[in-house]
Amino acid sequence: MDSKTHEQIIIKISGADKLGLTASVMGILAKYDAQILDIGQADIHNSLSLGIMIRIDEQHSGQVMKELLFKATELGVNIGFEPVDDDEYEAWVGRQGKNRFILTLIGRSLSAKQLQAAAQAVTEQNLNIDSIRRLTGRMSLRNPVKNVRSCIEFSLRGTSLDRDALQSRLMKLSSEMGFDFSFQKDDMYRRMRRLICFDMDSTLIQTECIDELADRAGVGPQVREITERAMRGEFDFKESFKRRVALLKGLDISVMKDIAEHMPITEGVERLMFVLKQCGYKIAILSGGFTYFGEYLQKKFGIDYVFANELEVDETGHLTGNYVGDIVDGHKKADLLRLIAQTEKVNLAQTIAVGDGANDLPMISQAGLGIAFHAKPKVVANAKQSINTIGLDGVLYFLGFKDSQLGESGVLK
């Protein structure tokens, strides 16, 4: 098109959404051979905001605007026009090559105060908000339900002045204001995650299996003290593991079945596993706990891989206080994540790791997307993403899923 005989116009339409509105507008533009340079639409509670940038022959622009004005009046919506000169348009095109990021905010509910704080943080880092979308379903005011969630996703563009400073700022706001966040580069890997690895105890289940075993063996307080110190990273995991397992000596293995059948599953696990399997993800449990319980969850949810610790059993069916094979500690988890990724031919940037303890940090740091889940302070401080306010299905929002895409209302009863 000859720039001397053509011009750019932004068309802005707002008002109550009407069936066939876009088709009517495009019909007028098509009649005059308008080129669509950009288009975007948002619909909030049946209130429409539609923007279209067109390039059109100057001799037709007046007639196009006239016909669009008549159509807007007929449909009962507002319409406005804004010219864009060539230099302004080229500057806009040039900005499209800048880095793009996704900031996801999650909470039981999200307030204007929380959104303002997050928006101000990214603005101070020279990042522009291109679009905002709600990932969770609409909640009912008259029929409130438990486990309600709210998630807002910001699409950002620009080059951050100091990404580490932004991460720290968001982490501080998250802690002070009670929301979760994820700040990710918006690249092809974010849209193509393929392997997700979970810790088991206090992540997929709301207990520590070794503590449950210890209670049955009558050594609960001693084992819990060691467990807590190890999860806080106060001393070596392998040494703590040996000490705790030794305390279980003589326990009848028949109790393991009962413990497995009564393990409290973490909120959101069923939904998360269903969606991940439907979408073709490979799923692994990498646990410092025990294979018996991991394999129980494997059968329940169709998990692809389980790597955990094997307790030694004597000929009478009692625990010996020893273990079989290598201990699955933090470094082993990271090695296993890399091994499974290699086996499945998955780039590390396409992997996800989720855990709560200090021994999960190596795999969380190794994965393309590492998430601390209801984690200890040390883990939250060292992970780039964390979920503390809702269930494990919050991971889905960090992956960009919308409740509407999953065929759900967004609220689990």
Image (cartoon, rainbow, N blue to C red):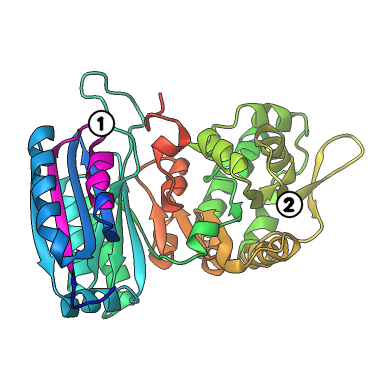
Queried whether the magenta region covers residue 12, the answer comes back as yes
275 sits to left or right of 258 = left
Residue 37: % across, % down: 29, 63
Q: Could you tell which of marks 1 and 2 lies nearer the N-terminus? A: 1
Magenta region, residue range: 7-30
> In the image, what residue occupies the spot 22% across and 55% down?
52
**Can you tell which quarter of the image residue 125 is in?**
bottom left
Q: Quadrant of the N terminus?
A: bottom left
Q: Secondary structure at mark 1?
A: loop
Residue visible at 24% across and 55% down in the picture: 32
Note whether 85 is above or below 53 in the view shown: below
Front in this rendered view, residue 30 or 72: 30
What is the CA distance from the residue labelled 1 to the residue labelled 2?
59 Å
Residue under pointer 1: 19
Residue topped by disc 2: 309
Whether residue 211 appears in this view of the structure is no
Is residue 413 in view from this perspective?
Answer: yes
Residue at image location 39% in from the left, 59% down from the top: 377
Amino acid of disc 2? Asn
- Quadrant location of residue 336? bottom right
In magenta segment, residue 349 = no
Q: Mark 2: which secondary structure?
A: strand
